[in-house]
Image (tube, rainbow, N blue to C red):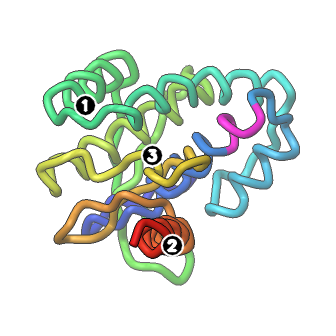
Amino acid sequence: MTQDLDDGNPRGLHFLADLANAVRTDPAPGAAELQALLEHHGGPPFRLTEADARELRTAAARLVHVLTLDDVDEAAEAVNALLDAYPPRPRLVRLPGRPWSLHTQAPPSAGLTHWLLSTCALALGLWLGDRGRCAWGRCAAPDCERFFIDTGRRTPQRYCTPRCATRVRVAAHRAQRTAD
């Protein structure tokens, strides 16, 4: 995962939400599925093994815990615990055709889990600090538990997509018409 942290860009956080949703949907996605997810988000140039996939699934469970929190103090404590356990090494990096941006690197001896958790913890911490609230969540639509990153600036987001929001509004409208 290339974690862009410049200008509050949530690119890496969208990877985190997609990873959480993938693990929630299929508790044991294989290396090929996780590799495709990494590549979709501009991930690092390495091939995942099944052992790497197990490691990512375990790390994802820790990240899912943070995404389920909506109390800002609890979220800050959870992010700080990840930052303590997996300290990030932020560096300015210029990817081909892009401006300089802040990325994290795992220490040379650290594995995939350290890299993922340090990167995501730093991104979540910056996002929480920038927004002043837990700007993430789980969809409020019935039968949808997808995680999302709230990129809006005003009213906190409640649904993962406009489709879920519309589905809930239409159901409420129909229920109101039936009640009248």
Q: Which residue shows up at 72% across the image and 59% down it?
A: 39
Q: Position of residue 97 (x, y in %)?
A: 53, 83
Q: Taking the image as drawn, is residue 101 in sight?
A: yes
- Would you say the magenta stretch is mainly helix, strand or loop? helix
Indicate yes or no whether the magenta region holds residue 25. yes
N-terminal-most mark, 1 or 2 = 1
Q: Nearer the viewer, residue 173 or 42?
A: 173
Q: Which residue shows up at 40% across the image and 37% down it?
A: 67
Q: Which residue shows up at 39% across the image and 62% down it?
A: 10
Amino acid type, residue under disc 3 in the picture? Arg
Q: Is residue 178 above or below residue 25?
A: below
Q: Which residue carries the number 3 mark?
A: 138
Q: Position of residue 55 (x, y in %)?
A: 68, 22
* Residue 125 occupies quadrant: top left
Q: Which label is found at residue 75?
A: 1
CA gap, disc 1 and disc 2: 37 Å
N-terminal-most mark, 3 or 2 = 3
Q: Which label is found at residue 174?
A: 2
* Residue 4 occupies quadrant: bottom left
Q: Is residue 151 above or below residue 47?
A: below
Secondary structure type for disc 2 = helix
CA gap, disc 1 and disc 3: 14 Å
Of tags 1 and 2, the one toward the viewer is 2
What residue range appears in magenta? 22-26
Q: Position of residue 80 (x, y in %)?
A: 24, 25
Secondary structure type for disc 3 = strand
Taking the view exactly as shown, the residue that stands out farthest to the front is: 180
CA gap, disc 3 and disc 2: 24 Å
